[in-house]
Amino acid sequence: MNPLKIMAALSTALGLTCGSALPAAAEPAPEAATAARSLPADPFFAYDRPAEYGVHRERVTVPLRDGSHLACDLHRPAAPDGTPAPGRFPGIVYDYNAYDQLGPQGQAAAYFVTRGYVAAVCNVRGSGDSPGYLDPFSGQEQRDNYDLIEWLAAQPWSTGKIGQTGVSYGGHSSLLVAVNKPPHLAAIIPVDGISDWYENTIYRGGIYSARIRDWQRSVAPDTLVTYAQHPLYDDFWRERSVKSRWKNLDVPVLEIAGWYDRYRQGMVENLQARGRNVWLVSGPWVHGWPAGQPADIGNGAYLAWWDRWLARRPGTPLPAARVTSYEVPGTGWQQFDSWPPAGTRPVRLGLGAGGTLAADPGRPATRTFEVNTEPAAGGPGQRLSFATGPLQRDLVLAGEIQARVRASFTAADGNIAVVVQDLAPDGTATRITQGWLKASHRSGHERAVPVRPGKTYDLDIRTWPTHYRVAAGHSIAVTVSSDDYPEIDSDAPAGRVSVRLGHGGSNIRLTTL
């Protein structure tokens, strides 16, 4: 059967052939309030063993190749009298970031220390008690991390097997040090890391992120000027990227991500690029350690990973599948051999002039919206909204949703934001995913391609991957606008955007399971 006919038949069965306009405002995704707390049915996640040691803490300075040093708290297995236990132990860099959180992270690491690991919690150069200039994810910071790994491996208490973990900043640091290939790094667990500092975080679709600017002001204010000087993807960003060096990502990687985390795209990209040595666990979590969030997997899975690759304990399990994913908002854990899972099907839906989102979007037409230049102040005339009719049965989205927006601009550039939502029968709209693109970046981020006012362009926009069940009776809704503050800046020049609709016009492609 013709693939287009298959998609049309599937769309009809799901009730996707007619629709109505989306309400003016949409609620953000819930923090998985309905998620079950049960673990995946997999021995890897049930793994544990008793504590054998106490914890001995000491402050150390780690020498670096240029004569500087890092401030670290070292947490070592302790004998009953509190002194360091005799013997050799594997080591874990338990967060390497700029937040001066040595105490709290040391407490979190105690579980692993009592089971025979040395944990080092360190401030990067220019933060906490580590002297120097803070330059997040720079080559210098990566070299320092390399030296830290090798210093730990050379200590008399060390077996020479070192791992690294961390969340957010520390998650990306773990990935970056891995692509630098220090000889004694044996495995990593990045939590809420990324693949590319430019695309995943700073310039989303080529548009500066207003959200990250608040982080810069509080953590690394000098980067406000520096990052603004690099609006295109260049060597400055490649240096800070895992994506540019995926071929070097050889150590075993256990990625911990969240379907409500704003950096999940990079974690999925790492898996897809280096699947032979990358495993992904993605839960119903917002940004941060899963501990304390619904469906937390606990410490056992982390311990199993370290016991497998660092302690080399016989019989320690690996995850039963490459991907362990919690289908949000509350269905539960599932396991797959790849992402997107095998058996997914594309469903293409066109944007119709009457606000419909359907396999048959109707006759060609054009609708226009005004560019919003004021953050968070957009009105009905500054967006276009589309929705399917109520679904006749549940629909599972498993992967990216891709949008093609055919648009022209009255200005010499413009931004397009696409937001996909779950529209409940009572009108409540829950954000599923989103994506953005600056029109001058339509051919990539390495150079800006001029936009001719009045000319129609095909703008292909990737949204963040998702694993989401839209319930029967709900609708899928899409909003197209120039603004999605605070995810992106409201920096598009004033003017109007005309969007082509109906047959031959704009559309989205769902990845369904």
Image (tube, helix red, strand yellow):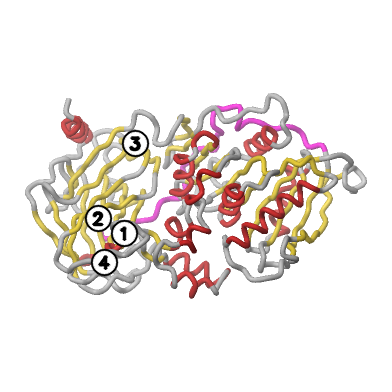
- Indicate the quadrant containing the C terminus: top left, top right, bottom left or bottom right: top left
Q: Main secondary structure of the magenta part?
A: loop
Circle nearer the N terminus (2, 3): 3
The residue tagged 3 is: 396
Name the amino acid, label 3: Val
Q: Which mark is residue 437?
A: 1
- Vertical placement of 419 versus 360: above or below? below
3D distance between C-alphas at marks 1 and 4:
9 Å
Q: In the rendered picture of this protein, how many numbered marks are placed on residues?
A: 4
What residue does disc 2 label? 459
Q: Amino acid at mark 1?
A: Leu
Q: Nearer the viewer, residue 455 or 104?
A: 455
| Residue 162 x %, y % | 71, 44
Residue visible at 18% across and 51% down? 506
Residue 414 badge: 4
**Residue plotted at (11% across, 47% down):** 503
Asked if marks 2 and 3 touch (Cβ < 8 Å), the reply is no
Q: Earlier in the sequence, mark 1 or mark 4?
A: 4
Q: Which residues are magenta?
A: 23-52
Nearer to us: label 2 or label 3: 2
Q: Nearer the viewer, residue 409 or 394?
A: 409
Upstream in sequence: badge 1 or badge 2:
1
Q: CA distance from mark 1 to mark 2?
A: 8 Å
Mark 4 or mark 2: name the one nearer the start of the chain.
4
**Position of 257 compared to 395: left or right?**
right
For residue 25: magenta? Answer: yes
Q: Which residue occupies the extreme left position in the image?
A: 363
